[in-house]
Amino acid sequence: FEECEAIIGKELAAEVRRKAIQLYTEAAAYAETRGIIICDTKFEFGLDENGTLTLMDEVLTPDSSRFWPAGQYRVGTNPPSFDKQFVRDWLEQSGWNKQAPAPKVPDEIICKTVEKYREALNLLTQG
C-alpha cells in the first residue's frame, strides 16, 4: 500500500482501498448467501477524463475472482472452484514451461471450464 501511495498519492490510494474493500465486502456477503466464498478477486481502477476514480474492466467474474463452494471448503485445503483455476491446474500438470506458445487446451478442459462458469452464474443469479 505504501508503494501505491508513493505512485498515486495518499488521498487517491486511500479512496481506491476504501472502495475496493467496500466492493469486496458487499459482494462476498451476497455470495455467501448463495453458498459461494469469494476467495479473492481483483479490481481495476482508473481515472476518467475528469479525474474521477472509475471502476474499469470486468469485476467479480470467474475470470477475475476465485469462487469456492462454501459447503466444500475446509481450512488448509484448496477446494474445487468455479473459475479459471481449473485451466491453470491443467496447464501446470501439462508440463508447459510458461513460454510462448502455450499448449492447446483440450476441448474437454474448455467444456468443463464453461460448465464451472455457468454453475457459478446460476448459483449467484437464480433465486
Image: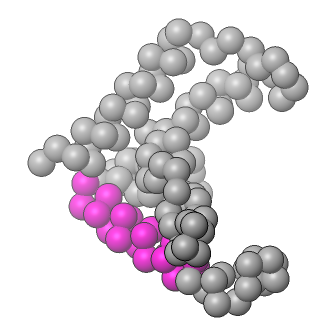
Residue 33 among those drawn in magenta: yes
Q: Residue furthest front?
A: 49
Asked if residue 32 can be seen in this view, the reply is: no
By what rule are the colours in the image chosen? one colour
Point out residue 12 in the picture as x, y percentages from the top left corner: 63, 83
Between 32 and 62, the residue placed more toward the observer is 62
Residue 32 among those drawn in magenta: yes
Point out residue 48 in the picture as x, y percentages from the top left corner: 56, 66
Q: Is residue 89 above or below residue 73?
A: above
Q: Is residue 102 above or below residue 125?
A: above
Image quarter hosting the N terminus: bottom right
Q: Is residue 65 above or below residue 40?
A: above
Asked if residue 87 can be seen in this view, the reply is: yes
Point out residue 42 in the picture as x, y percentages from the top left corner: 57, 58
Q: State the predominant SS element of the stretch in magenta.
A: helix
Tell me if 32 is positioned left or right of 88 in this view: left
Question: What is the magenta range?
Answer: 16-34
How many callouts does the rendering have? 0
Residue that appears at 65% across and 32% down: 88
Tell me if 21 is positioned left or right of 1 in this view: left
Point out residue 10 in the picture as x, y percentages from the top left corner: 70, 89
Residue that appears at 57% across and 67% down: 49
Residue that appears at 46% across and 53% down: 59
